[in-house]
Amino acid sequence: MDGMINPVSGVLPGAADVAIPEQGVVNLSRRGLLGMAAGALVLGAMVKAGPARAQGEGLAAAAPRPGTQVGAFLEFRPDGKVRLLSPFVEGGQGIATAMAQIVGEELDFDPANFIVDCAPPGPDYLVVNGRRLTGGSLSVRSSYGTMRQLGATARNLMVRAAAARWDVKEAELTTEPGKVLHRASNRSATYAELVGDAMKLQPSEVASLRDPKDFRWIGKSVARLDVPDKSVGRAQYAIDLKVENMLHGAVQHAPRLGQEPGDLANEAEVRGMPGVHSIHKLPGAVAVLANSWWRARKAVEALQVNWADAQNANALPADFSSAGMLERLRAEKGAGSPAEENGDLNAAFAGAAKTIEAEYDAPYLAHAQLEPPSAIARFNDDGSLDLWVPNQAPEMFQATAAKIAGLEPGKVKIHSPMLGGFFGRHFLYEASAPYPQAIALAKAVNRPVRVLWSREEEFLRDGYRPMGFVRFKGAVGADGMPVALHAAAIGEGPIGRYFTQSQPVDSSMVEGIAGKPYAIAAKRVDCVKVKQPTIIAFWRSVGHSMNDFFYESFLDELAAAGGKDPFEMRLAMLKDSPRHATLLRAVAELSGGWKRGPFEVNGVRRARGVAMASPFGSEVATIAEVSITDGEIQVHDLWIAIDPGRAVNPGIIEAQVRSAAGIGLSSSLLEEITYDGGAPQQRNFDTYSILPLARMPRVHVKVVESGAALGGVGEPGVPGVPPAVANAVAALTGQRIRSLPMSKTRLSST
């Protein structure tokens, strides 16, 4: 099938699944721990003789609850460092630092002294609602309680070990970062000194969590752990890795998905090129192995391949085009299934003072990550397989790689390097990653093989953000306020394709449209499923990335229809939602006070637009200020207020919002994948435009902590940017942009 291979069963975890109390389990009883967790507590240590790992006394009879085995996560080293095996993959989002802060807070250990690596596959790390993945802005909010408990349990063991060593009561002991103290006798011991004794102990009857008012690190802008190595070039990404006796593989994919390689017209000539080891046919591709990647690439590009159509149910039709797909979505008039419904919609429209309708669309988008895809596969003498592969879900990749290799999952070791780009690119989309090719080639030549895709092959086989299309009908009453709204989202989303095929509503099609906080007496949001033949994928902020543009732009159209200021109208519609109203006021204050415009700055006409979004458990309000130069949109400032409930690291939140704003602006102004003749027409950055540095605006961020449940931070900064910009453009020019990217529309500043 096209798309994600072997997804986990059930629905992809989302914001609705996660509700994490601040205190968690304050008093963790042994009965509660062992009854609920059904498992052992072990403590890992790195002592002079090497890593020490041992199980608690008789406690390993049952399978552990994920997150309860301290030894699966922590190694205490004699140099005073602690190695933390994180359930999550670092891809620039700062998750290694956040995990160190959370565990370090309860362990009483300075986050700066952690070494954080991604954990291998294993049941201990299934901490995302019983699964494991890095995505959906879920990492911190889904594991916060678990990782705090982990640190608290480890600290408790250290205290008890010291009490036994010094023959004192536990209550007489305190901790400072990395050590236990008995102030009455002026004795102290480091965690590294105590770990040998601590690992022999059973779990405590009580492992108390800190009171949040006493936090040292949670809530502070602790410096990023990954930045120093990245700054000096020590950081190791997948494309930097090497394995002894490794061959380098480059591929040429079929121009159209579903085609297979036939005759190779010049095979003998290519075999004779410098450094070439062998030539191979793969599903939908040909590959060359050589003693360097550049030689492999030059050879595979020289191959003259006769591509033939094959019997593949998921092949892209030869006449498939983006324009044709959009027309198909536009022509679909089916009612679909309601994702949200309240009030008497027909009566509301019948009694309205004014009714308007509009259609919005957004194109396919590439992930356009900086690091091109790669994978290394090595079969070992014992029949096992080592696989170095960028990924966001190690257990899922392990299971799939095992099936490809014909092995049991336990025989496959997944190495998860730091990601040089994220955005939902590294899930299991069939034909969109090189690891199956690396496995097949390594098996064929009985040597380790690294496959690295060129930029052109990456664009050709990327899984794209799906095309979006929404049809709106709305109405305002005699007072100018919205009284009715009907939206129909038409198409397909990644959650519906990969996780909820049998359900009538695909949540990734309607998020950002259904469940908005504005008070509208009658509304209905329909999900109308229309399959798209392309490989579709998760993309940063998923459906929110376009749906909030659709909804918040149309909301401004309703404001215009009712003669209302769009900011004041939103504020009035949020009178019963104080969290959202507070955030809207906060972004206005951040911007120096709301003013729509047009107005002049240094003789140049500008205007502002506003938008709100509720992605991934967080709330966001955005204001954009724009001008038009030679028909091109210039965004001067973005003001973004984000309410993530609570902040683990405000500095990381601000950085993530700024980066999200950049990708949100790039996607709304410039980015687009177009299909023609069954193939994408953009194959590199010369034809797939991304936002240049010169067009990046000033981004001002304010973190507003409402005290609500923890929300995500990696993606929420994206969806408010496109509608805020579009609304500002409409205020400035009178032109309403309903189709992305905005560069397709020629604009005038008057």
Image: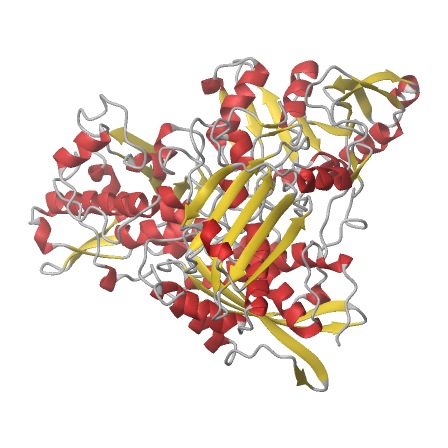
Residue at (54, 36) in percent of width and height: 336
Quarter-wise, where is residue 430 in the image?
Answer: top right
Say above or below: 609 vs 595: above
Q: Position of residue 693 (x, y in %)?
A: 70, 64
- Label count reads 0
- For the N terminus, the image quarter is top right
Q: Is the residue 745 above or below the residue 685 in the image?
A: below
- 612 on left or right of 461: left
Q: Position of residue 92 (x, y in %)?
A: 54, 51
In the image, residue 400 sits, relative to residue 339, either above or below, namely above
Question: Which residue is depicted at the point 72% across and 35% down?
Answer: 453
Q: Nearer the viewer, residue 683 or 48?
A: 683
Residue 77 appears in the figure: no
Colour scheme in the image?
A: secondary structure
Q: Residue furthest bottom?
A: 602
At which x and y percent is residue 571?
44, 70
Judge by depth and name the residue closer to the eye, 71 or 427.
Answer: 427
Query: Is residue 308 toward the left or the right of residue 509 in the image?
Result: right
Q: Is residue 663 visible?
A: yes
Left or right: 103 in relation to 211: right
Q: Residue at x 17, y 27 (%)?
A: 57
Decide which of 473, 456 is in the foreground and name it. 473
| Viewer-nearest residue: 349 or 445 | 349
- Quadrant location of the C terminus? bottom right
Residue 324 image offset from top left, x and y in percent: 76, 38
**Which residue is at a point 66% across and 54% down the rendered structure image?**
667
